[in-house]
Amino acid sequence: MPIILENVSFFYSRNTPLETAALKDVNLRIEKGEFVGILGEKGAGKSTLIKLFNGLLRPDSGKVTVDGLAPSSKEVKRRVGMVFQQAADQLFCRTVYEEIAFGPLNFGYTRKETEERVFEALDAVSFDRSMLLRDPFSLSGGEMQRVALAGALALRPDYLVLDEPITGLDPAGKKEILDTLRKIKDRGTAIITVTHNLKGFFPLLERIVLIQKGRISYQGSRKEYLETENVPLPPVASMMRELKVRGVPVNPAVFTVEEALEEILKVKSMIEKEKAEK
Amino acid sequence: MIRFENVSYNYPDGTPALRNINMGIKKGEYIGIIGKNGSGKSTLSLHLNGLLRPQKGKVMVRGMDTGDFSKLQGIRKIVGIVFQNPETQFVGRTVEEDLAFGPENLCLPPMEIRRRVDRALAETGLEKYRYHSPKTLSGGQGQCVALAGVLAMEPECLVFDEVTSMLDPDSGKAVLERVKRLHEKGKTIVYITHNLEELHAADRIIVMDRGRIVLEGKPENVLSDPSLRDLGLTPPSLIELAEHLKNHGVAVPWEKTSSPSNFAEEICRLFLKM
């Protein structure tokens, strides 16, 4: 069973002169095990959208269900885990162990069951047990983000929802998180992430949802996305698009340096061949 | 204008943050500093105006030693720093008050403070937020307030420490454009970042690793240097592509790697010439 949004609209400052529509008639379906990227400019409604998934916000009209359940139910809070942008803002315990155990204990799991979940989550984010007694605030940005991820994973969610999980991290920290997410996804957890970082996330995304001014303006596969007009693209893909527009017969639907190189060299050898024939 | 002589600095726990740094920054130069977390970039930036003082060696700003306490105010008139999280730098209840804080501390006359605040507001396009609380602004606008606060001090040298890393791409680009314009107006710029894509316009790039300067030079040489990856840094993808193409006899000149459209235009030109 998936997360389903039907004709969902959401307003800030409803029924006041400041009323603004953050989301308008959004229809979206997210299946178990998917890796979905939610893209869009700032203020487009991305963060509002994901807060509807576990009942942090409730729609003003339309309906949200998670596996058929209402998002206000406790079970949905367990099934949909959330990690926000600045991990440091979400950590508050004295040790990494307490931090990760907080969710399961709050849900009433026994000490033993909690411990099992903490170890499992620790493993999922590739930390060894020596981490458990560390002070979360003594860790690097990437490590703190992994602790926040582990905290969400300890509830064994079916959906992991992330808001800009690699913003503000250095390249090594970014790679740490992307590798971790890949692993979590391979274990069968759906990952839904809001991101501006196309370059980093693109290789991982199976489906892309683009939000513009509160409406979904595109949703589909990565390949179709690269062929869609007027969507934000990573630099290499955007360059390939420009080549295509200028009449160079390349396949613009690529995003890695290697693929682009291959495409450009293909055209080059084509030109060389034509010239040789003349 | 600024000179580091054998500068070393250890964190309180004893880990070396800077190891024997020697470097100079000329007036009007635009310098990029890159390096992964913990490489010493920010520690270095805090030495530029005496927020940190070297434990060994010395830092001279226009002939003034940052270790000399009586010179600090003079040094801070010359070098201003903008940090990553603007929220942690706000002191005023309104944007206007926030900008006046620096000049007030320089004990300037009220008319002069007014002039500087107005000018900083105009330069950053913040006039309409003059009476807003800085805390209610967006990330990009907040970063502008932080920048305006430093501009109101009218420093000759501006240091930017990862100012775009928490911003969305559009706000980031806007901040970067502002930095370029300030450089064109003659300001000395020190720009610290993780994002190598932002350093195309720099005059010189310094790469740091474990407290040392490990690579230094013009952007065209540094950004295409094969050792960047070993240092935990990702080269800009268009520059990487240009390097690969060069090995296959398609030479895209450095200036054309600055944007996707320039790059594509150059490829078209090269193909037509074939």
Image (tube, coloured by chain):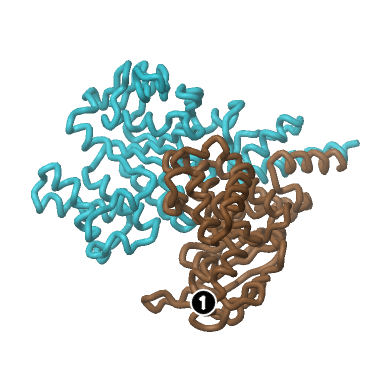
Chain colours: A cyan, B brown
The residue that disc 1 covers is: B69
Q: Of residues B70 and A97, which is closer to you in this image?
A: B70
* Screen quadrant of the C terminus of chain B: top right
The percent coordinates of residue A180 (x first, y second) are 37, 51
> Is residue B209 visible in this depiction of the protein?
no
Q: Of residues A266 and B244, which is closer to you in this image?
A: B244
Q: Quadrant location of residue A155?
A: top left
Residue at (36%, 58%) from the top-left corner? A143
In the structure shown, which secondary structural element does the residue marked by tag 1 occupy?
helix
> Is residue A266 visible in this depiction of the protein?
yes
Q: Amino acid at mark 1?
A: Phe
* Screen quadrant of the N terminus of chain B: bottom right
Q: Is residue A143 left or right of residue A251?
A: left
Residue at (83%, 40%) from the top-left corner? B269
Residue extending farthest to the right is A278
Q: Of residues A226 and A85, which is closer to you in this image?
A: A85
Q: Quadrant location of residue B265?
A: top right
Instruction: Sort mark 1 into few (<14), some (14-19) or many (20+) by Cα contacts within 10 Å.
Output: few
The percent coordinates of residue B261 (x first, y second) are 72, 39
Q: Is residue B182 left or right of residue A170?
A: right
Q: Is residue B249 left or right of residue B109?
A: right
| Chain ID, mark 1 | B
The percent coordinates of residue B84 (x first, y second) are 49, 54
Q: Is residue B24 left or right of residue B270?
A: left
Residue at (32%, 28%) from the top-left corner? A52
